[in-house]
Amino acid sequence: MSIYSKIAAYMGYLMADTPHSWKDGPVLAILSGLSVLYGWGVRRRYQAYVSHPEKQAHLSVPVISLGNITAGGTGKTPTACYLARWLCRKGYKPALLNRGYRSQAEKGAAVMSDGEHILLNARAGGDEALLMARSLPGVPVLVGRERARTGQMAVRMLGAQVLLLDDAFQHWQLARNLDIVLIDSTNPFGNGHLLPRGILREPMEHLRRAGFFILTKSDLCSREEKEKICQTLRKYNETAPVAEAVHQPAWCISFKDWYEGRKDRHGCSQLTVGATVTAVSALGNPASFEATVCACGYHLGDRIRYDDHHPYTAADIRMMEEKAAQCGSVLVTTEKDAVKLPASDILERQVPLWVLGIEIVICKGEEALQTCILNHIGGTT
């Protein structure tokens, strides 16, 4: 485990809603002080936009933001893909705007996909944006932290009629018609503290900005726990509807089939249930992926975890292959990881690698969500 991973693991332990040792006291005190400063900065920055709305950019088409109030994954990327596909079926031409985190295009503005051709790789445009581009043929995907700039590009250059902002609840520079906030049902608000003492990106009272809530991973908690989450949401926002969603494994196919873009999955090599696998991921929450692997009926022989957004190398592939061979398993990874893997090495070496596809399913409140969106973009059901 790298030093970064060890620090991240310790920070995760400190930020969790669990008892801590007395030895952690000094560090917790420092983190609490930093949380106070962080909260002051967030409130001041937000108030600057509330007091001066003219600072916000306004675009000529409806803007829908997807985001969360906590750090970590809640399912924004698959939800954005779900909404983009639905808008296409309704006759709209959406475009997705992604920050391109840790990519070469993050500080600028670039087109990851024009809807017909993928123009950038993961290093240039980011792994999440590339995954969206591969998953959404016909839908433009643009990257850059200045969403007003990429939004203008999407409208003027690509004819976008609706803009979907990925991970933008805290992106106040661009005005939006609707804020959809995703809540992880398994860890909705952490320990209630702001970063870095907890996982909250901004104060809980800012939930009042949300126009709709989606409880993700809702199948992993009880009805009583979900009711408690809803009670907390109602404390800060009495009007926004609440839907429930689950992360559902859709398929597990060979890397070769996935890389060649066999979208319909028919005739693809599917991994047999009961197979022994080594889970490979570079995610913020690898345990969730590993639990999904087990839920699919595969036997988890081993796991390989890299730092979030890790750039895979040929050396990584050799190590993964050797580790899988030691326990007589095949390798299984996520689509988000697959877009970063060196395909030439995998295909040339015939590495036994499989890609597990995850889709989000709105299991409760789907009609309410769709109606809410149409009301905010001026459409009809």
Image (cartoon, helix red, strand yellow):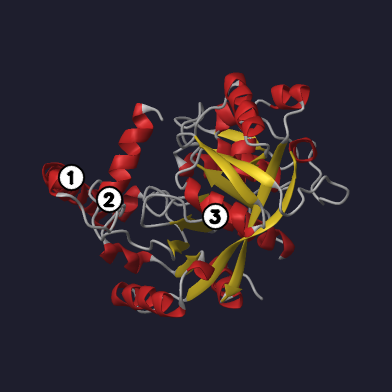
How far apart are labels 1 and 2 at the CA level? 9 Å
Q: Which amino acid does label 3 sit on?
A: Ala
Disc 3 secondary structure class? helix
Vertical order, 259 against 262 (above or below)? above
Q: Label 1: which residue?
A: 31
Q: State yes or no: discs 1 and 2 in contact (Cβ < 8 Å).
A: yes
Q: Which of 161 and 279 is in front in this view?
A: 279
How far apart are labels 1 and 3 at the CA level? 30 Å
Viewer-side label of 1, 3: 3
Viewer-side label of 2, 3: 3
Q: State yes or no: discs 2 and 3 in contact (Cβ < 8 Å).
A: no
Which residue in the rendered view is the most extreme toward the right?
Answer: 267
Q: Which amino acid does label 1 sit on?
A: Leu
Whichever of labels 2 and 3 marks the residue nearer the N terminus, that label is 2
Disc 2 secondary structure class? helix
Residue 352, x across and y down, in percent: 73, 34
Tell me, for residue 291, which label it has, or none.
3
Please identify the quarter of the rendering in which residue 348 is found.
top right
Q: How many marks are shown on the rendered structure?
A: 3
Q: State yes or no: discs 1 and 3 in contact (Cβ < 8 Å).
A: no
Disc 1 secondary structure class? helix
- Residue drawn 45% across the image and 38% down it: 145
Residue 314, x across and y down, in percent: 62, 20
Tell me the crowding category of disc 1: few under 14, some 14 to 19, or many 20 or more residues within 10 angstroms, Cα based.
Answer: many
Residue 190, x across and y down, in percent: 32, 59
How far apart are labels 2 and 3 at the CA level? 22 Å
Q: Which of 184 and 157 is in front in this view?
A: 184
